[in-house]
């Protein structure tokens, strides 16, 4: 502002428009002089991410592909809840070097680290859009119930479970988390950083004064080194469970915070009572306090390059009950945006059939939403202060008869309509599911 000949306070005004009002159109920043608005229009952009594609699930989940300034593609997902709250699932890297075999992002390889700005922006964009919805709601319905509804519409949680391994982009993730808490007012306890187990950075995180007290989630998936290394090569790279589990124990003891262990249930692999017992004994063997460990189980999201299939609902039940019998709280999570994730799985085969090589570079970034194995329902029921309460509730927390378990990813091929949507998406068109139905 000063370089352009304006007073310093103009910077705060612009910032307020963008962050507090959610307004990114310079023309609407009415308290700025015309000259400044013209300069901003010509020389600045309120964001660096452009929406390249968007898919909207029947359950309201929105999945977006963003194009970064250098052309890299990343993804974010917004998941709504019935009480008006929203969770954003964001990416920390373009691609990923960890190579988890069930993950489409892992199959595509690593492109680059995202900057702190790019990470923050994914959250800020959703927060701003929800802010706008709230304002519209309040403006249109100047009455009791509607105003309350508008107030409840807000971004409340953030999970680092999109593309990339957040602890492999540690510095930028710390910066972004600080901005999310400071600028957007989302509490650190509402931010979950999910890692495959980058042990040195779990150790760093344990005492890092610069990192706000986020929730830590670890993709465990298997309780033996052999099985885990087969699924997650990072297990071998970082010294196996002998390194990971003590690091988690120290994290719990030093921070006093509970951790989440994520467990993607794969049919016939890790979804039976024996697997649950092995997990319980792993926790015990390494001295982790059972009341400080929470396990989230979620059926695997299948991807084209991995043969494993999601477990059946009865196995989820057995797994959860067995863990709880061993004193470990466990929540089965319902996958969100199932229909659009199914689209991701179908994308690869459709494109391969057509041998559309020019599209291949775009496949991984779209397909990578299936990397959000472990994106789960909001953690409101998993409050650190309420562990005993949760422990009782968990086995009843999912209605297995619910329609939500009629999961189309359990069934087979894409139909033509789905294929058309996917092709349009790959070609960079923003298209909504409803428009094709
Ligand atoms: S699951 Fe996460 S860490 Fe593993 S390859 Fe996928 S994005 Fe990377």
Image (tube, rainbow, N blue to C red):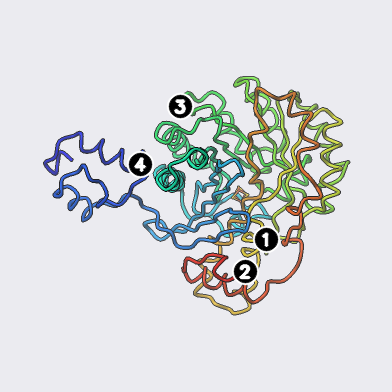
For disc 1, the marked residue is 303
| CA–CA distance in space, label 4 to label 3 | 28 Å
- Which residue is nearer to you in this view: 11 or 104? 11
The answer to whether mark 4 and mark 2 are in CB contact below 8 A is no
Query: Which residue is drawn at the image coordinates 41% and 35% (left, top)?
Result: 179
First in sequence, mark 4 or 3: give its number.
4
Q: Secondary structure at mark 4?
A: loop
Q: Earlier in the sequence, mark 3 or mark 2?
A: 3
- Considering the numbered disc 2 on the image, is that residue within a helix, a strand or a loop? helix
| Residue 82 picture location, percent across and down | 61, 44
Quick check: can you spot residue 146? yes
Residue beneath disc 4: 21
Instruction: Tell me which numbered mark, 4 or 2, is placed earlier along the sequence.
Output: 4
- Which of disc 4 and disc 1 is earlier in sequence? 4
Residue occupying the far left of the picture: 5
| Residue sitting nearer the eye, 111 or 321 | 321
Q: Is residue 270 left or right of residue 196?
A: right
Of badges 4 and 3, nearer the viewer stands 4
Residue 210: mark = 3
Give the numbered dot on residue 170.
none
Q: Say above or below: 16 vs 308.
A: above
Answer whether labels 2 and 1 touch (C-beta < 8 Å).
yes
Residue 222 position in % (x across, y down): 76, 43
Q: How far apart, in angstroms, are the residues tagged by discs 2 and 1?
A: 9 Å
Earlier in the chain: of badge 3 and badge 1, it is: 3
Location of residue 380 by image quarter: top right
Image quadrant occupied by the C terminus: bottom right
Residue occupying image coordinates x 60% and y 44%: 81
Q: Which residue is mark 2?
A: 348
Q: Do the residues under discs 1 and 4 have CB atoms within 8 angstroms?
A: no
Residue 20 lies, in percent from the top left, at 36, 38
């Amino acid at each position: 502002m000063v370089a352009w000949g304006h007073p310093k306070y103009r910077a705060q005004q612009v910032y307020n428009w963008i962050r507090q009002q959610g307004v990114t159109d310079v023309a609407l920043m009415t308290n700025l002089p015309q000259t400044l608005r013209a300069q901003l229009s010509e020389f600045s952009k309120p964001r660096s991410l452009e929406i390249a594609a968007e898919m909207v699930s029947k359950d309201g989940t929105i999945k977006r592909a963003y194009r970064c300034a250098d052309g890299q593609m990343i993804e974010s997902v917004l998941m709504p809840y019935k009480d008006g709250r929203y969770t954003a699932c964001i990416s920390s890297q373009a691609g990923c070097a960890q190579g988890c075999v069930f993950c489409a992002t892992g199959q595509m390889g690593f492109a680059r680290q995202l900057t702190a700005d790019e990470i923050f922006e994914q959250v800020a964009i959703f927060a701003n859009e929800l802010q706008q919805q709230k304002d519209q709601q309040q403006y249109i319905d100047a009455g009791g119930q509607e105003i309350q509804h508008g107030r409840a519409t807000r971004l409340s949680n953030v999970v680092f479970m999109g593309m990339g391994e957040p602890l492999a982009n540690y510095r930028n993730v710390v910066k972004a988390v600080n901005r999310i808490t400071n600028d957007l007012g989302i509490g650190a306890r509402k931010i979950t950083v999910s890692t495959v187990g980058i042990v040195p950075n779990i150790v760093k995180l344990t005492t890092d004064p610069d990192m706000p007290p986020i929730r830590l989630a670890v993709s465990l998936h298997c309780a033996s080194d052999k099985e885990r290394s087969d699924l997650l090569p990072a297990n071998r790279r970082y010294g196996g469970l002998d390194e990971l589990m003590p690091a988690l124990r120290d994290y719990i003891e030093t921070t006093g915070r509970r951790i989440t262990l994520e467990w993607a249930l794969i049919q016939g692999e890790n979804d039976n009572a024996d697997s649950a017992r092995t997990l319980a004994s792993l926790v015990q063997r390494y001295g982790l306090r059972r009341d400080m460990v929470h396990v989230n189980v979620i059926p695997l999201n299948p991807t084209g390059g991995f043969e494993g299939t999601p477990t059946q609902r009865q196995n989820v039940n057995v797994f959860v009950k067995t863990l709880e019998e061993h004193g470990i709280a466990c929540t089965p999570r319902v996958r969100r945006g199932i229909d659009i994730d199914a689209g991701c799985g179908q994308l690869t085969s459709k494109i391969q059939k057509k041998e559309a090589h020019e599209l291949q570079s775009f496949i991984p970034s779209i397909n990578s939403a299936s990397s959000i194995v472990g994106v789960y329902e909001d953690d409101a029921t998993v409050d650190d202060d309420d562990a005993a309460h949760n422990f009782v509730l968990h086995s009843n927390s999912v209605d297995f008869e619910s329609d939500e378990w009629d999961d189309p990813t359990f069934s087979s091929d894409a139909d033509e309509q789905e294929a058309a949507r996917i092709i349009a998406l790959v070609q960079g068109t923003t298209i909504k599911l409803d428009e094709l139905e």
